[in-house]
């Protein structure tokens, strides 16, 4: 046996033989995400699978190869996970899980907060026009702009529907990263736009919401929204189905499965497959830098627009509405609502804004799905 040839073959089979500088950079980014998730606690349920998918694909690219790329009948493991993203199965199931976990009572009790959720979508449309100016085509600009809703599943859903899979990795990673970084990005904007007097406003207790109202809400929203924008059915329909499981009170097993076991399985599949789209070749380019920057612009504008409308409502209500809750109009549920509570508590530790902020927060989930449906309608995509 030729020991030299054997050693050479073994060395050639290691990942070191094919790693590029770009791969090492992406591996370092994966380590950073793992640090933020584990040490700092930034949305670990999202960042850990995303970071690990990123790590795997930059060590072993074959794990994301299609059968054609692999030169055989089967593809890489994470390629099959990713096909579930492309078919919009995983984003839709995520929405069903979110619906099964979410209490829409604050929005039902104070419908005016829906306006704040709508206002926060301004960042999406602002980023769309900026993306056009930066040279992206209309569909790519639309897919990128949805990052402003801080809604990973909707970003993935729209990018696939519009056929922008080439930039899906940067879009998804940016969307999920900004979801995780809500506690860092939003507070400076909120403090800059409000006065201590506004931040200290105590809002009246929300009225009790009846069981009938809670049951009718998902049925009515699905009917109205999907009649106007049928393309939102996979997202809005699944969101409201999950919520109907919760509020009907007669399918506890389905609600618990959607909100827990199924939700966590889907997060694993979606997170690792999203992370696996970030190979060095696909991720390290100027378009990625633009996408990450546009996502931040969209998210900042959305936060600012929500707070701005909150300030208007503060004036119109005679000082009864705390404008901080407007920042929760982005889709990061319930993180954005918690940030509203946290910033308000800095001024008055006894002020309780969380439930009030949940109104615009859950409205933002619906609003982002509607924004995605609007773009699909504009581009004639079904």
Image (cartoon, rainbow, N blue to C red):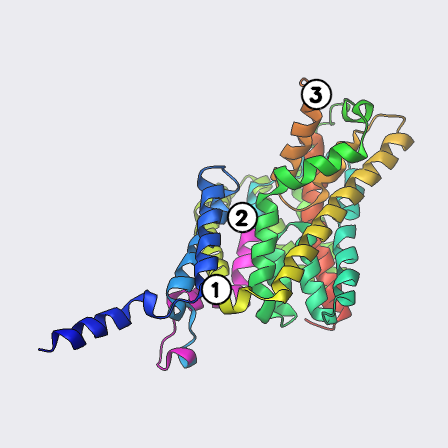
Q: Which residue is mark 1?
A: 22
Q: Which residue is mark 3?
A: 351
In the picture, the quarter occupied by the C terminus is bottom right
Kind of element beneath mark 1: helix
In this orientation, which residue lies closer to the viewer: 318 or 12?
12
Judge whether residue 99 can be spotted in this image. Answer: no
Dot placed on the residue nearer the N-terminal end, 1 or 3: 1
User: Picture quarter containing residue 359?
Assistant: top right
* Residues packed near mark 1 inside 10 Å, few (<14), some (14 to 19) or many (20 plus): some
Which residues are the magenta region? 69-95
User: Relative to 70, is 272 above or below?
Assistant: above
* Residues packed near mark 3 inside 10 Å, few (<14), some (14 to 19) or many (20 plus): some
Q: Is residue 113 toward the left or the right of residue 162 in the image? A: right
User: Relative to 379, is 346 above or below?
Assistant: above
In this orientation, which residue lies closer to the viewer: 363 or 352?
352
Q: Is residue 6 toward the left or the right of residue 153 in the image? A: left
Q: Which residue is mark 2?
A: 97
């Amino acid at each position: 046996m030729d020991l030299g040839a054997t050693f050479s073959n073994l060395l050639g089979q290691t990942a070191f033989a094919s790693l590029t500088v770009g791969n090492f950079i992406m591996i370092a980014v994966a380590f950073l995400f793992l640090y933020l998730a584990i040490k700092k606690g930034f949305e670990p349920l999202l960042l850990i699978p995303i970071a690990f998918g990123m790590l795997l694909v930059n060590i072993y690219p074959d794990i994301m190869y299609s059968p054609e790329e692999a030169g055989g009948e089967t593809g890489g493991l994470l390629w099959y996970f990713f096909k579930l993203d492309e078919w919009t199965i995983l984003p839709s199931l995520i929405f069903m899980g979110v619906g099964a976990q979410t209490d829409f009572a604050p929005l039902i009790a104070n419908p005016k907060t829906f306006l704040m959720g709508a206002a926060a979508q301004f960042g999406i449309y602002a980023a769309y026009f900026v993306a056009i100016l930066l040279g992206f085509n209309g569909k790519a600009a639309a897919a990128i702009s949805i990052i402003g809703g801080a809604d990973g599943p909707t970003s993935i859903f729209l990018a696939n529907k519009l056929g922008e899979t080439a930039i899906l990795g940067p879009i998804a990673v940016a969307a999920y990263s900004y979801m995780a970084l809500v506690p860092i990005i939003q507070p400076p904007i909120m403090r800059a736009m409000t006065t201590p007097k506004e931040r200290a406003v105590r809002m009246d207790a929300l009225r009790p919401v009846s069981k009938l109202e809670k049951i009718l809400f998902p049925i009515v929203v699905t009917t109205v929204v999907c009649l106007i924008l049928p393309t939102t059915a996979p997202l809005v329909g699944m969101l409201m189905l999950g919520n109907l499981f919760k509020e009907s009170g007669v399918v506890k097993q389905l609600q618990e499965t959607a909100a827990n076991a199924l939700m966590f399985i889907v997060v694993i599949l979606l997170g690792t497959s999203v992370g696996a789209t970030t190979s060095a070749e696909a991720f390290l380019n100027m378009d990625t830098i633009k996408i990450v920057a546009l996502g931040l612009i969209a998210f900042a504008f959305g936060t600012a627009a929500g707070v701005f409308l909150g300030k208007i409502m503060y004036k119109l209500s005679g000082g009864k509405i705390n404008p901080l809750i407007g920042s929760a109009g982005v889709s990061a549920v319930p993180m954005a609502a918690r940030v509203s509570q946290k910033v308000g508590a800095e001024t008055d530790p006894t002020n309780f804004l969380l439930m009030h902020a949940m109104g615009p927060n859950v409205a933002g989930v619906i609003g982002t799905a509607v924004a995605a449906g609007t773009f699909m309608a504009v581009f004639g995509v079904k």
